Image (spheres, rainbow, N blue to C red):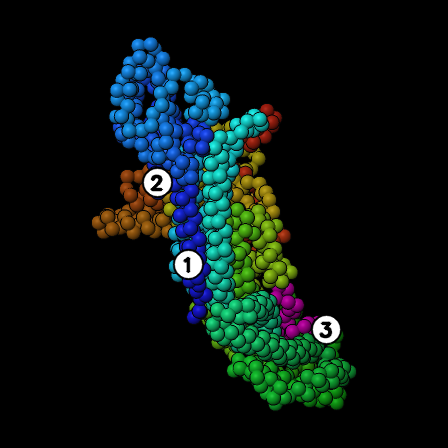
Amino acid sequence: MAMIWMQTEKAVVLELQRRLSNVAHSIDEIMQRESSPLYAADIITELKRQFVFLSGGRGQDGSPIIIFPEFPSFCEIGDQEFRNVLTYLTSIPSLSAAGVGFIVVIDRRRDRWTCLKGTLLRISGWFPGNLRLVLVLRPSAILQRTLTDVFFKLQRDDFKVPVIMLSSLADLHSYIERSQLTQELGGSQYYCHKTWISHRTDLESFAALVKRMAERLQVFGRELAETELPNNLLTASNLLNAQTSRKDSFKEEMAGALSQGRKLLENIREPVRRDPDSSLNPDQLENLATVHRLLSQLNESSTAFDEFWIQHQNKLDLCLKLCQFEHNFQQLRTELEQTTDTLNAFSDVGINSAQTEHLLQELTNQEKKACEVLDRVRSVVAEGQCLIDSSQNVDNTVAVKCSELQRVRENLTQELKDKRTMLTQAMELHRRLEMVCKWCDDGIYMLASQPLDKCQSQEGAESALSELECYLETANEKQQWEISTVWLEYENILNNELREQVKRAFEKKASLQEMFERRRVSLKKLAAKQTRPVQPVAPRPESLSSPAHREHENICISEDSDSRVSCKQVNSDQVDRSNRNPSVSEEEETLAVLRRHVMNELLETERAYVEELMCVLQGYAAEMDNPSMALLIPAALQNKKDVLFGNMQEIYNFHKRIFLKELETYTDCPELVGRCFLDWMGELQIYEKYCHNKPRSESLWRQCSDCAFFQECQKKLEHKLGLDSYLLKPVQRITKYQLLLKEMIKYSKGCEGSVELQAALSSILGILKAVNDSMHLIAITGYEGNLGDLGRLLMQGSFSVWAEHKRGHVKVMELARFKPMQRHLFLHEKAVLFCKRREESGEGYEKAPSYSFKQELSMAAIGITEHAKGDSKKFEIWSSSRDEVYTVQAASEEVKTIWVTEIRKLLTGQLEACKVEASQQRAPEQFSSDTSSTNRLVRNERSNLRSGGVEKPKADEERVKELENTLEPRMTGRAKGSSFSFETKPKRQDIRSDPTPLGWTKGSLSLDASVEHDGYFSAEEQVTSDPEEEKEDKMCADELQSVRIEEEIQCSEETEVPEK
């Protein structure tokens, strides 16, 4: 910004320099610096010796008196020292007093003539002032007095000064009044040499300070006048602050100098204050006058600088105001550009009412921010106008910029109005389209829900026809809204996407009207046709159902996506097929409409889901990085954004950029949407990471849920629900997919893509199960190894477990339990883990169970017995040597079947791998022999199984025989004559793992929506003894000891095979 800065007038600077120069010159005159450049501080040592001093007394004609007191070592004083002191003393009296001439009084009453002579010769040889008279008190000793009289008469002409020899003080008093003499000379004047030196040094120091202040103010004033004024706010503000600080420092120094001068006045007046009857001597009075003159010069310096500073400060204030205006202008221009860019981004009017409503809300927020900016524009324009009116030193650019701001303000206000009008029209259009679509959907459901079997009678057909016509009559307003009207009314907001929506809505309405017309024609024919009565064994009609067209058919009743399916068989001989069956094309069209309805629900919920994620990320996550919100964030939430939101940003990016667009490509062929899920099933694995982090996120939320930060964010977003409800959205969404896929499968039987839909459903359920299993797995505590080394987790679930331990051929009775331990088993590819489920605490996700590791059994060293004695839900897991046997009881036979089957697969896989390894190491001939032996052992094992016995593994020197004896007996059947079929096993995703997601209680959302039971299989204990279990067992140990021994002996006889 170009500005014409106000220049400091030369007259002002020159006036300041002149006045301060006069002050410095006046101080020199006051202190008589021209006659003597010496200061008391320079000769302080010589003055303290007091071989001569200025008492302050005056002669009868006002001559200053200089006294040389008794000083025995006067001859030792150097000439330069003598001259300096005498020169300084003669410069102290005023010029008028010094012009009269000095009177020198020499006291040598105790001295000798030689010393007196030396003193007179020194004085006569060099005296800096006008010496009027020398009064000498001669030596008082007889000899010295005689010598003095004789030699003075002989050498009188050598002294060149008027000298008067005095014999006594009385003679001295005849020349000088006693009041002008010190007490040593018989006078009444009080004199303290130390005080005199102090006053002189203070006075000269004060005079030097005043002069130095004047000189510094001169330099400072010149610097201020020559300072180049800045053109930006920060520099101008810093300059003003710096110069003001220096000015304040000078003012403080001046105040200190004034205080020092006043204190000096008080010190000079001290004798009068102590004794009001006393008076100051002429030298003291001159000192008072000198101090007053110095104070006057100091005030003059301060006044001159203050007048200069006022004008300089006005210049700096104007500079600062102009810089502030320029800064505000630049800042407002940037904010106005950002606001304009933001409004330009509102070119989209939304693809549905929810999105448009969200855009309206965002526009409202932007209007609030824009109003603040516009208010500031108004304030800055008024500020600029004041600058223009108040100063003539401001150039025309300020007025130009004020005009520019005013123009932008008007344009922005108009643009806000246009945007709101556009979005309001879009909202109106969406709502009218939704009304049309809702009317169409309700009509479709009405057609689909009409009981077609009742329509075979004349009364039923007439009732259905009446219902159809009544529904058409209620839609007159919607049917009168033609597409041409839409093009005219909403021409300004219609883009390609909205045009397609309008076309689809009217096509849907036209299609429905066509369906209504066909149904009406059919119903009119049925109403006019005499139908024969049918037996009342027709199937009960249900909503959204259609009869089949076979002689013995299943009518499926579906109330909603989660309702059970029941089928009833109807004998076609009881109903006339020609009277009750609609056309096949009508049934297919109804199913197609239902598929489109499911697809629309999938797309609409997907768009709403993306919008909700965006709101959370922008309204909460982004605000955590906003400096203005930093004070509202508690310490526990600092730098915890990744913990609170997990990988929500990654989920949003995937759905926004990829998945939503891919789903929209299947709008016209919803039965093929399973391919979309299969194509992107790998990317949907990101939900596993989010679910793993959910317990930590929930815990952090509970700590900080009441903080002002979340309340402020929720207030800005105008959400009725808190953040925790939106953090649950990803979990709800991944669960919703399988429900929508089930609905789509139900309406797509026999269609192209049904196989892909079923595969997509299985994959989604697999993801839910993997998330569920892994969330249980990460809750294991106390395991020292790496769970990743155990291979993939295959199953997990809760069981009742009995443990038996043997030492040789004798069972350890104390380790045999009658009461089962509750354990949670984790079946990996390489090991089985036994864990104890701990008590849950907290709420929500904090109420997640934890599992304490108790036992690990390697899959390479265990075997199983499929049927345990006493219960069909039991099976055994034992070590290769059968020293440890764990009897495991499942919650149901189906669960047991799944687990036994999976373990058998693992053991069989180990056996096959060992066979391959052995075949690579042995010769073909030996391998054939070993195979025969192996087959023989297998046949023997199976024979033992049929007879109810249990074969113990035996050692063999041959590798294959050892492997057979180790692995084959690990898969035995225990019960006599029992058979086990795997053909009737339930689906694996239904029962193979504990379905309760870690962190979701019965009141929370379950990840595995396919599981209908709501509990765990059993409670949890530990595999090995716990202190609580031992304490509990010990309570009944005495009563059960004998029974336990008998049962152990009996069990041993039944299970062990006698050695041959």
Above or below 555: residue 833: above
Q: What number is the disc on residue 14?
A: 1
Residue under the image location 27 percent in, 25 percent down: 157
Q: Quadrant of residue 85?
A: top left
Mark 1: few, some, or many residues within 10 Å (few <14, many ≥20)? few
Q: Secondary structure at mark 3?
A: loop
Residue 558 sits inside the magenta stretch: yes
Rounded to the nearest whole Å, what is the CA distance between mark 1 and mark 3?
122 Å
The x and y percentages for residue 939 are 38, 47
Q: Write down the residue under mark 3.
A: 537
Label drawn at residue 35: 2
Which callout, 1 or 3, points to the residue nearer the camera?
Answer: 1
Q: Main secondary structure of the magenta part?
A: loop
State whether residue 150 appears in this view: yes
Judge by depth and name the residue closer to the eye, 300 or 615.
300
- 185 w.r.t. 374: above or below: above
The quarter of the image holding the C terminus is top left
Q: Is residue 410 in the magenta section?
A: no
Which residue of the protein is positioned furthest toward the right in this rendering? Answer: 459
Question: From mark 3 to mark 2, how far is it between C-alphas?
Answer: 144 Å
Name the amino acid, label 3.
Answer: Val
Residue type at mark 1: give it: Leu
Q: Where is residue 1037 shown, x and y percent of the image?
A: 58, 26
- Disc 2 secondary structure class: loop
Q: Of discs 3 and 2, which sits in the foreground?
A: 2
**Label located before the other in sequence (1 or 3):** 1
